[in-house]
Image (tube, grey):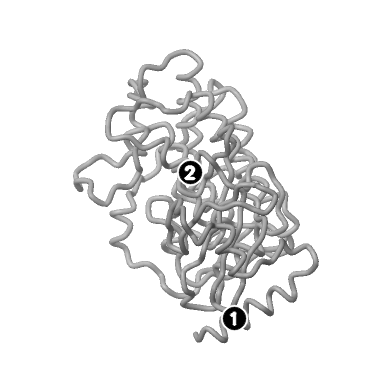
């Protein structure tokens, strides 16, 4: 699709968006805010992020989107989903730029970066974050996801929950970010369509990969959140493309340990900290059930995390299938039906 058509789609969306739209800036403004894109904070599939400052002195993160290859859907998704959202556990969109094909999104600056930098270690588990803080991050993220699923006027499926997309402010309060793959739907809809798979290998629910596992729904975000919980406790990625094929799939290892009452091997923890770790693991295992109908809703997940781990029971052991094995299946590249009931 040409840049002209892409630009027309974006401008039409912005005209229809209404008066609640965040502040619009020119690309010249963006260059000034970021001191000519001097300090790069990171890079993702949709563009690069730079540190900047508003005229009032507030620090910001500016995501400059890569040159578009389609209809501008990623940009539209970001503005449409979080432009009107105000929740403590969802990143806030302060403004945007749409100067022809040059597009940028402006957010509050998160001084502690993403959760990813705090949970993955080469050595045996040695938390940079206290277990209480880690647990609060998990609970806050679940509450943000519950707001997206149930608290918004237009409900939102994020479809890319992972550590990289959980940002942490100065108090380590988590903020769900990056809505480029999100899907909006109304409370009255029962089924919507999705063309192709969306998400990141290792966090993508089986039904997103292939409709033979079921229909895509809010339970698909729950699956991704479950993988996130297991990674937070274990300090390792659930899916490592470089790992030996004979290596035990991490969720399978977690289940076996909990089932036999074995050592969790998550560092020198005991008492309340061990209860937190076990609670997160059990909830994570419920979330990654292969059949979407067997997974709890995100509201139930919040209740499970906020309760007592002694009241939780292990879910039935699913037929664990690692993303590496799943990737050998033929994914359905056609029309996928999405249930949102």
Residue beneath disc 2? 114
Q: Name the side, left or right, on which 306 lies relative to 277.
A: right
Picture coordinates of residue 83, whole percent (x, y) = 69, 59
Q: At numbered mark 2, what does the secondary structure look like: helix, strand or loop?
A: loop
- Where 121 falls versus 308 (above or below)? below
Please indicate, yes or no, whether residue 67 appears anywhere in the rendered image. yes
Q: Name the side, left or right, on which 82 lies relative to 317.
A: right
Residue positioned 49% across, 31% down in the render: 280
Q: Residue lying farthest right?
A: 19
Picture coordinates of residue 162, whole percent (x, y) = 46, 48
Q: As rendered, which of 208 and 8 lies closer to the eye?
A: 8
Picture coordinates of residue 198, whole percent (x, y) = 47, 63
- Where 14 falls versus 1 (above or below)? above
Q: As rendered, which of 305 and 50 lies closer to the eye?
A: 50
Q: Quadrant of the C terminus?
A: bottom right
Q: Earlier in the sequence, mark 2 or mark 1?
A: 1
Q: At numbered mark 1, what does the secondary structure look like: helix, strand or loop?
A: helix
Residue beneath disc 1? 7
Q: As rendered, which of 297 and 84 lies closer to the eye?
A: 84
Q: How many numbered marks are there?
A: 2
Residue positioned 45% across, 75% down in the render: 334
Crowding at dot 2, Cα within 10 Å, few <14 / some 14-19 / many 20+, comes out as many
């Amino acid at each position: 699709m040409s840049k002209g058509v892409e630009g027309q789609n974006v401008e039409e969306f912005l005209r229809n968006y209404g008066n609640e739209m965040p502040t619009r800036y020119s690309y010249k403004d963006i260059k000034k805010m970021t001191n000519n894109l001097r300090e790069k904070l990171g890079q993702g599939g949709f563009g690069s992020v730079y540190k900047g400052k508003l005229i009032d002195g507030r620090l910001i993160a500016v995501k400059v989107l890569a040159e578009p290859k389609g209809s501008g859907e990623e940009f539209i998704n970001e503005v449409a989903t979080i432009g009107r959202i105000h929740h403590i556990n969802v990143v806030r969109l302060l403004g945007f730029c749409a100067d022809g094909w040059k597009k940028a999104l402006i957010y509050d600056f998160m001084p502690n970066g993403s959760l990813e930098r705090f949970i993955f270690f080469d050595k045996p588990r040695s938390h940079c974050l206290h277990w209480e803080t880690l647990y609060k991050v998990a609970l806050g993220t679940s509450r943000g996801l519950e707001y997206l699923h149930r608290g918004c006027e237009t409900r939102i499926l994020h479809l890319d929950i992972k550590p990289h997309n959980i940002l942490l402010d100065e108090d380590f309060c988590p903020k769900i970010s990056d809505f480029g793959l999100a899907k909006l739907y109304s409370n009255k809809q029962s089924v919507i369509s999705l063309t192709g798979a969306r998400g990141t290998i290792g966090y993508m629910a089986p039904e997103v990969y292939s409709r033979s596992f079921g229909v895509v729904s809010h339970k698909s975000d729950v699956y991704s959140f479950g993988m996130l919980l297991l990674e937070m406790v274990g300090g390792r990625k659930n899916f490592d493309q470089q790992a030996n094929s004979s290596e035990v799939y991490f969720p399978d290892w977690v289940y076996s340990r909990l089932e036999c009452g074995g050592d969790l091997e998550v560092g020198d923890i005991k008492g309340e900290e061990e209860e937190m770790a076990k609670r997160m693991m059990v909830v994570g295992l419920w979330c990654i059930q292969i059949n979407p109908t067997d997974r709890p809703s995100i509201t139930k997940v919040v209740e499970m995390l906020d309760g007592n781990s002694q009241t939780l029971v292990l879910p039935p052991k699913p037929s664990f299938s690692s993303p590496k094995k799943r990737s050998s299946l033929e994914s359905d590249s056609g029309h996928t039906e999405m249930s949102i009931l």
